[in-house]
Image (cartoon, helix red, strand yellow):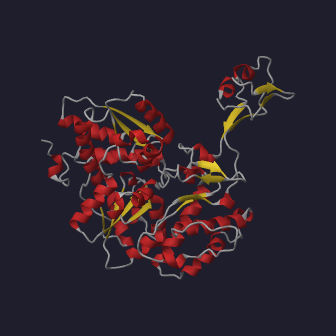
Amino acid sequence: MKESYASVMGLRRLVFAEVAKIAFTDTPLEELETVGYRLYPGNTPDDFEDVFRKRAIAEEMIRLAMGMDLRDYGEYIPVTDGFNDVDVATSIFEPPLVDVIKFACEACPTRALTVTNNCRKCMAHPCTNVCPVNAVSIGKNGAVIDQEKCVKCGRCERTCPYNAIVEYDRPCASVCGVGAIESDDMGRAVINHDKCVGCGRCVVQCPWGAVGDKTMIYQLAKALKQKDKRIYAIPAPSYIGQFGANTTPEQVRAAMQELGFEDMIEVGLGADYTTLHEAKEYLERVPKEIPFMGTSCCHSWTLLIEYKFPELKDYVSDSGSPMRYTAEHIKKKDPDALVCFVGPCTSKKVESITSDVKEYVDFVITFEELMGMFVSMDIEPSEIETEEGEVESSSSARGYAMAGGVAAAVKEVAERIDPERNIQIEGANSLKECIRMLQMAKAGRKDGYLLEGMACEGGCIAGMGTIASTTRVRKAVNNYMKDSEYKTPLENELVDDSLKDFS
């Protein structure tokens, strides 16, 4: 969807670059007061339509990019109100991290089935015959659906020989698998934060740019300028292919260092740690203590279980996420270091402030936000000359970026440790699929399984904070997996030998 929403995604990235540049160049924060006018000056044909609305949306995006809450629209508040409070070089995240820009919301119709003018008013009228609640009737010009009676089963849509009945939904709600998108008294979208699992799918699905997420770009840039701080960037395995089809990992590392990072350590290293921990945990707990085990990498998947299936919470692996293990690895070697996770989604932002991860991870940004920082400093990773670097992660760890990769990695190691075990795995990649899989597990139909859940279709390579197309990144990750000299974490020389001892 991001590829076809170029204008909205383009605005987000311009905003990220503006905020990063303000921080890197020590420009007074007051300059952000006029950012809407700079981005939409109103002197091009594209600006003529809804120019004031576009400027207002840009202003709210600036506030979110600074890590601030949205403004109260009932009174006049300057764009930069409260910015001095976040003019710091540390994380300032406070929930909610994802929210709706109310005035930008179109109050789109909620889910319904409707009859189009393709209806031929045929003699068979199968739509009326299959409706279980008699909500469909034949009117003067064609079929009519009584929305008060309709239970949205979709039978009429499927049976119509002319495809004259269509189902629609508001875009943000259509991708929210947990029903967190509700409506206020004016019909505008509202996020129920007691249900939201922070996946951020709604952010990139809204064609009006009316849903946004907070960033810590400004605070990170301020920290990178301080020479007494050593900040390590730890990119998720899905970073491969994000910054140019031919950009190498070493070029990304060099670009990070030009921004001011001390070094870059791939989260694939932490993924190797997670694989070993989860393999050991599965062998010890299933089926002796628990009937099945869920993976622990996707925080939105973990929150989904906590909110909707609390009785299954103890069946999720106790192992830490790759982000946490990578940060721990760095801080063991350099206790005074700061760590910045660079990943594909808002889910990791939520994880960084609501779990035990926050003592290890100091900053979290997305690939999209990092690109904004590169743009602000005129850094083009693909143009940097570098040499080949050290292999930090195994092939299976690099596969964590794609749906099915986590469970496959754990299964391979667990079966090598205990060759007599034949571990069945199953994965779901979307919150709706995750719910269906968990319902089956709750009913006892997944006993003995290792279950992998991911909030995004296709896995982390399709996260809301990614840049490149899923197809291109999948190909790049597959090639990167082949390039590793380590097949599994058991061969990775950077992993502590104590973790490889299963005696």
372 left or right, relative to 399: right
Residue 292 seen in this snapshot: yes
Check the image and report above or below for 379 versus 296.
below
Q: Tell which residue pokes out farthest to the left in this image.
A: 503
Check the image and report above or below for 385 versus 304.
below
382 left or right, relative to 83: left
* Percent x, y of residue 92: 45, 69
Q: How many marks?
A: 0
Quadrant assignment, res 36? bottom right
Q: Tell which residue pokes out farthest to the right in this image.
A: 140
**Quadrant of the snapshot with the C terminus:** top left
Q: Which residue is drawn at 56% across and 54% down?
A: 203
Q: Residue at x 41, y 46 (%)?
A: 302
Residue in front for this viewpoint, 414 or 467: 414
140 left or right, relative to 437: right
* Percent x, y of residue 83: 54, 76
* Percent x, y of residue 394: 26, 48
Quadrant assignment, res 141? top right
* Percent x, y of residue 286: 27, 34
Residue in front for this viewpoint, 197 or 28: 197
Q: Tell which residue pokes out farthest to the top in this image.
A: 124
Residue in front for this viewpoint, 351 or 3: 351
Residue 243 seen in this snapshot: no
